[in-house]
Image (tube, helix red, strand yellow):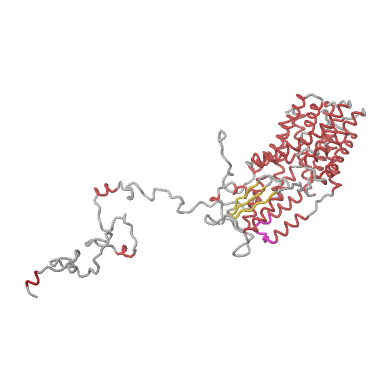
Amino acid sequence: MTDAEDRKPQSDEARSAFTPPAVVAAPAEAESSTTSEFAVPDGLAVPKHATESETTSEFSVPDGLDMAPAAADETEGSAFSTPRTYSAKQTAAFTPASGIPLVRLAQDVPWQDRMRTMLRMPVTERPAPEPVQRHDEAGPAVPRVLDLTLRIGELLLAGGEGAEDVEAAMFAVCRSYGLDRCEPNVTFTLLSISHQPSLVDDPVTASRTVRRRSPDYTRLAAVYQLVDDLSDDETHVSLEEAYRRLAEIRRNRHPYPGWALTLASGLLAGAASVLVGGGFVVFVSAAIGAMLGDRLAWLCAGRGLPEFYQFTVAAMPPAAIGVALTLAHADVKASAVITGGLFALLPGRALVAGVQDGLTGFYITASARLLEVLYFFVGIVAGVLTVLYFGVQLGANLNPDAALGASNDPLWQIGASMMLSLAFAVLLQQERSTVLMATLNGGVAWVVYGAMHATGDISPVASTTVAAGLVGLFGQLLARYRFASALPYTTAAIGPLLPGSATYFGLLGIAQNEVDSGLASLTKAVALAMAIAIGVNLGSEISRIFLRIGSAEKRRAAKRTRGF
């Protein structure tokens, strides 16, 4: 090629805008003409550890580049730069390096206290369960465990147990089979429980409705024994064995026959009439009236009538016998006969359970229980007022002052109070081993009440509160000693303290058109009933102060100030 040919311009196809000029030598290692703006510039040494990872942060300062102080000051205001005052050692992490402190629960205390303590903890702070009933790697099926838990809670709630204790028992059953993320919920007629295996898994929820309630403390004690065995580390109960034992508890017959229950209701009414000053004739009359009322209530129950009408019918025979004795001009205290008959009908346990649920924070269940007590009380009022109205129209001169005089013999009163507690324990279908302790506890309650009210001239409301507090305290201590429920030791013992006479005087005043005095007596009856309920609950709480609860730290409760 000649020089002229070299100076001849080439075509556009033969010339590229990215072709380096002839005087510029292309680097030998450049295999591609495209480069990245994130590539490390030439002349900057890249550390060895930076080349081991393919992903680096574009906001990090390259190694080997020494930033001047002025430059550091300028970049300190960037949102991606680390402040000079920041130090990882001075900032506490959300989870400490040593982990969350472990909450240790004492194993030598009753399971009720341990479960109640964990229920009041946040879910994230509850200690991990140690499943004592798991026999394989996978463990039992979650729906079956939840179903067993609901069936156990149903028996406890139907037997009259408080909502807090029912939740503690349900939680204990779930944790014994390794289900830690469980949340039981108890209302008056509905039981539900939810289990969530982890934060990313769907929860499993089951519920059960409680439609019938029958006070059977023998069955209640058997259910408590089953829960205690499930919570015990040394006793291994499989899921099938737990179902079998639960079926046996349901099939077990009541420990006392029907005639024994009717006789116990008569014995209770007779003993209550003696406490308000009645003699032998009054004792027999009150017993007959209570037994007739019990049989009529059974007849109404067999016909499917609601409990409201059962209470109304059961209250009529004692009132009718009292009016008949007054019309016959018998030298007896007819008011004591009617008062004794009311003792067998007053829903003492339902009232105590309602107030206890309210004090422990279960306001929906407490409202439902107290509303049920109100309906029963209205039924009793309707039955007694109907008979008293006809008695007043027939000319019966019922004098309420005749029932105010009590026996001057304290031993006779103590014996009558213990007899009343004994009959009450039989009506509640208690185990024979607990009847004696409940009877003694009732005698202690009456001794304290008599010493404060009769001897010390203290108001009946304050005396009733202290006596009921001792009943709750001794009942809770006996229950902890036996690892059982406290109901068999407390419910029958509060029988002598029930406001039967105040209720009767209020109804009599309304029937005789003395509305002011009648409402005053009914208000006193309500105050005495609330004193019993609060005293029993306070005694139970005092017992937990002296006993060790389920954890090393103090028992948690909701802290509220000025209502919010």
Which quarter of the figure has residue 556? top right
Residue at position x 59%, y 46% from top? 120
Seen in the picture, residue 50 relative to 427 is either above or below; the reply is below
Is 309 one of the magenta-colored residues?
no
Which of the pair 232/397 is nearer the observer?
A: 397
The range drawn in magenta is: 228-240
Residue at position x 27%, y 49% from top? 72
Which of the pair 137/18 is nearer the observer?
A: 18
Which of the pair 389/342 is nearer the observer?
A: 389
Observer able to see residue 547: yes
Q: Position of residue 528 (x, y in %)?
A: 73, 33
Q: Position of residue 560 (x, y in %)?
A: 56, 37
Seen in the picture, residue 504 relative to 347 is either above or below; the reply is above
Observer able to see residue 542: no
Left or right? Give the position of 26 relative to 304.
Answer: left
Seen in the picture, residue 387 relative to 360 is either above or below; the reply is above
Is 230 one of the magenta-colored residues?
yes
In this view, which residue lies farthest toward the left? 3
